Amino acid sequence: MKIVKKIGVPNKLISHHLTDTIMQRFFKVSFLYILSFTLGCGDIQRSNGEEVKNKVKGEQSRVLHDFSSIELPDELDFCGEKLPLDNPEIRERAERELYLNLQQPGQLMLYMKRSTKYFPLFEKLLKEENMPDDLKYLPVAESALYMARSGKDAVGLWQFMPETAKSFGLIVDEYVDERRHPLKSTQAALKYLRGGHRRFRSWLMAAAGYNMGYSGLEDDCNFQGTENFSELYLNEETSRYVFRIAIIKFLMKNGEKYGLYFPSDGYSPQRQKTIEVHDAISNLSIWAKEHGTSYKHIKLLNPWILKRSLPKAKNNSYIIAIPDL
């Protein structure tokens, strides 16, 4: 049994603070509507209800004015490839993602707080692979940086389907699902994206193919006679996907332009060390206590472990993380 030390990555904290934003005014309007309805019920005096309704109208006007003044940035790009915002159809698609994302300030807040937990890993691997740093925003759009499972059984930060994951060397079985392994799934995703870029010579197209599959994208390209992302007619999900990534990237980097001030206290990756295990583990709770930790910590630090036990490893050994206290 071999113990290998790993040092936690320092946070890249973002100096922001949430204040009176456009979204907060939306919440205020909603509250006032509720209050207006309440005051209009029972024996509440009509004058009070009218006063609240007038205040609601004033807030509505203010909010609508603020939202109508919101505009796209002059330029929008992904991995250095610009989206042609001078094209009315392209601009409409980009504005759709901008407005819908601005309606979810809580979700944007979670993107920022979770990014300090995972972006250091993504940035390190992207730099090692000499790939664009912007690719770190792709899993934000995919999973909201959460170990999610989609209705189509896509799992993990990078939302791999089972067969695709296996084709890139990830183990997916009854006991282990490496789609939930931050390091291994990221390595597989970058390999997948690299292949897409090699085929299409475009990171916009590589991202589109990541969403819909490269064979399907190639079929669309052959039928339509173009490999220019902006000129392709794609399915609804994919046609929005790349714009969503580009808008998420822009808002996470420039949220203050829209009144979004993000917190400085992101979520931190827990300091940990790893243990190489060659044998089966019949009871992970007992095993955890033998190594000075708990079953809960084992599950949180190793989300790829699905059950309460582990059979003998298929690839010689398991590398299990435990807290480095």
Image (cartoon, grey):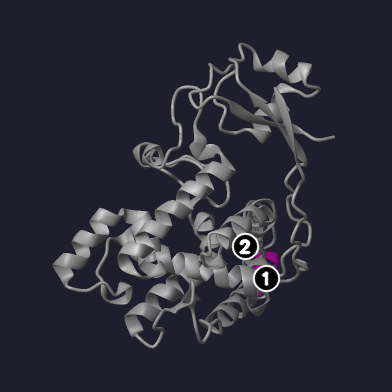
Q: Which mark is residue 105?
A: 2
Q: Quadrant of the N terminus?
A: top right
Q: Main secondary structure of the magenta part?
A: helix
Residue 51 is inside the magenta segment: yes
Q: Residue furthest left?
A: 223
Judging depth in this view, the residue of 227 and 266 nearest the camera is 227
Residue 143: give x, y in percent of width and height. 51, 50
Closer to the camera, 189 or 260? 189
In space, the residues marked 2 and 1 are separated at their CA atoms by 8 Å
Residue denoted by label 1: 260
Q: x and y percent of residue 168 in the render?
A: 40, 42
Compared with 130, 76 (above or below) is: below
Dot 1: element = loop
Q: Quadrant of residue 302?
A: top right
Compared to residue 96, the image places residue 37 above or below, namely: above
Q: How many marks?
A: 2
